[in-house]
Amino acid sequence: MSAVSPAVSPRGLFSYRQHWAHRFGRAPFLPMSRAEMDLLGWDACDVLLVTGDAYIDHPSFGMALIGRLLEAQGFRVAILAQPDWSSAEPFTALGRPTLFAGITAGNMDSMVNRYTADRRLRHNDSYTPDDEGGRRPDRASLVYAQRVREAFKDLPIVLGGIEASLRRVAHYDYWSDTVRRSLLMDARADILVFGNAERAIVEIAHRVARGEPPRAMTDIRGTAVIRPAVPEGWAVVDSSSLDAPGPVAPPANPYADDGAEQGRTPGHCQNGGGGAGPQGPPPDDAPDDAPDTAPGNLGTVVRLPAFEAVKADPVLYAHASRVVHLESNPGNARPLVQRHGDKEVWINPPPWPLSSQEMDAVYELPYARAPHPAYGGARIPAWEMIRFSITILRGCFGGCTFCSITEHEGRIIQNRSQDSVLREVEHVRDKTEGFTGVISDLGGPTANMYRLACKDPAIQRLCRRLSCLHPGICKNLLTDHSALVALYRAARGMPGVKKITIASGLRYDLAVRAPAYVKELVSHHVGGYLKIAPEHTEPGPLAMMMKPGMDSYERFRQMFEQVSREAGKEQYLIPYFIAAHPGTTDQDMMNLALWLKRNRFRPDQVQAFLPAPMALATAMYHSGRSPLKPLRRDGGAPVFTAKGLRQRRLHKAFLRYHDPENWPLLREALKRLGRADLIGPGKRHLVPAHQPGGGAGRPPGHRPGGGTPTTGKPGRAAGDKPVRAAGDKPGRAAGDKPGRAGGGKPGRRKPDRRKPGR
């Protein structure tokens, strides 16, 4: 029984010998019908990809990227997009594939796509033609897997995408308010691929083509499989309880963060998330990242608390969440195993990041860069959003606890080369219909982490920090933005490019360390408004989010306004905020509302925290405890979370303090908080004492005719808008750009005549 290779030089993504079917050549679009397959001369497809999204042949959409990558390996790939799931018959339309079916819910978790943060049904779907809702089932990966099993007996099933990635272990499910089993168990699939899937899916395809069943592929990074038991020859670190990780030889401690490594690696990271667990750090000759050092051992596997245990014990769930996140660095992560009944879910370490050469090759595959012709002229909002934007990086080392990027893409930044990005700019300019000279974004999960990395690969390999930026920027992090500045300048200087705007999230705590970057960004790449995400103003919530304090925001605001003045431009910052995040009290929200009023911000739309599967903040929401530090059964301060619908509405109402429909609820809360002094007509008051036009007593969000103050449409709470939770602003790869779980929506500053900087 082989162990996952600890080598730091993985096999090249394009080093495999092509499958024999490469002789059929490249398809203009991956086929969605038997007629298209016949035109290509296929008698069958090798891989059938089933997705909950419309098929858009562009690398921002996961199925297109994976499909084109497998095509480049020589496989015949067909797409079954948004099939009718009421029976198995639609799943047979393209015939039985020769190798396997790959299944994904799409670029978003299907539950996040379908329901608001208040569990209310959405009536639209940005990934569907004409924005039509209801074209994919709830828990789409599970439903599609069931129908594929019915359609094709014994066909291997490979799960992937954001939904599978974030549900690979036992996870809290907000919509059913319970802990559910690993999706691999519920879907009864052969193998689950998590994270950026390129390396895993290519290896799986070639090994299946050689006759190996996916269930037997237990040694592929970035995958999870079901096993009857832990095989002989593996040393087990027992982290199935809170207080006593089991001793092994050599000793290892699943809570051994960076502090456990101090003194062993010069310049090693200082951990801001807590030190070693109760067993203390392991001895210097048994580092956490060396699982294969014990003679006779195949390796070391960390045992998580069983599904039944974490379902019954929320604090144990938070402990398991912490252990999973500590085992997320490809350089030192060990396999995880979690008991589900009489089976073991075996989760291999995360995949190795792609090199720049591999990233370039993946993004420059021969995509049609358009929706499939079968959709005719239908408008697909997700495509409209990204058609003129370009991905330049993957990953995020910020570690925000509400966000799913880290769990899906990892903390190591993967970069495209400047030449590759510029070639794509040329392609958009010359071949994308409707291009007017404006590139809408050069970015990724964050705008300004391009080519940022740890100063020493050896330090990076050992690091177990949950964030490189919290509680402060790590001293080992290189923050030089010069490569990104050079890319911006080269792109905006290309003929036919009038302007390049930056729409990805900006880490302003990093930007303030790079004045040249701020000058380039603000002078040339802001279209009047720049959206940034402080998320909150108060230290308590910010600590639970692992976000920087407002001093970083103020420093960036001053730089922004100064550069805007120097450039002769009137430009404004638009902040994002989250309501009802774990660790946020009513007092915190009141203070945030006062800050908004002092600074003359009036958010148009706001968003309450949405507990996405596997996020650290979701563990806080479910357990009332923080997994940011080692947990104890008998210690640790509880984490307050607004859970009831009324209290969650109150937190959103504080963000929209200016909306008269929220005033009755806010008056009541201010009196309860002992701040009735904030009720009145003056500038120092938050809300007036009386309702305008006899509106007193109306519930928040009420509007005659059944609409809402923000949208005027039935079916949504005031201010609700589809979120990018477990993510997924369309935009990245192995598809599935995980977005921010429950991020707040931008606000608008109250119009005034003051210039920036006054």
Image (spheres, helix red, strand yellow):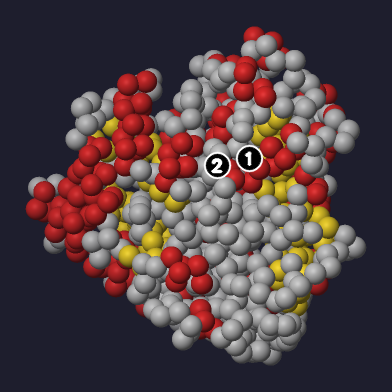
Counting from the top left corner in percent of width and height, residue 730 is at 50, 40
Quadrant of the drawing holding the N terminus: bottom right
- Of 48 and 664, nearer the camera is 48
Instruction: Work out how far the residue at label 2 is from the one at label 1, CA to CA, in angstroms.
Output: 7 Å
Q: Quadrant of residue 210?
A: top right
**Do tag 2 and tag 1 residues touch (Cβ < 8 Å)?**
yes
**Residue drawn at 43 percent across, 69 percent down:** 468
Label 1, on which residue?
A: 202
Hey, which quadrant is residue 201 in on the image?
top right
Amino acid type indicated by mark 1 = Val
User: Mark 2: which secondary structure?
Assistant: loop
Q: Nearer the viewer, residue 41 or 554?
A: 41
Measuring from the top left, give residue 713's x and y in whole percent.
53, 38
Residue 340 visible within the image: no
Q: Earlier in the sequence, mark 2 or mark 1?
A: 2
**Secondary structure of the residue carrying numbered label 1:** helix
Against 271, is 36 above or below? above
- What residue appears at the point 69 percent right and 37 percent down from the top-left corner? 205
Can the viewer see residue 519 in this picture? yes
Q: Residues within 10 Å of mark 2 (few under 14, many from 20)?
A: many
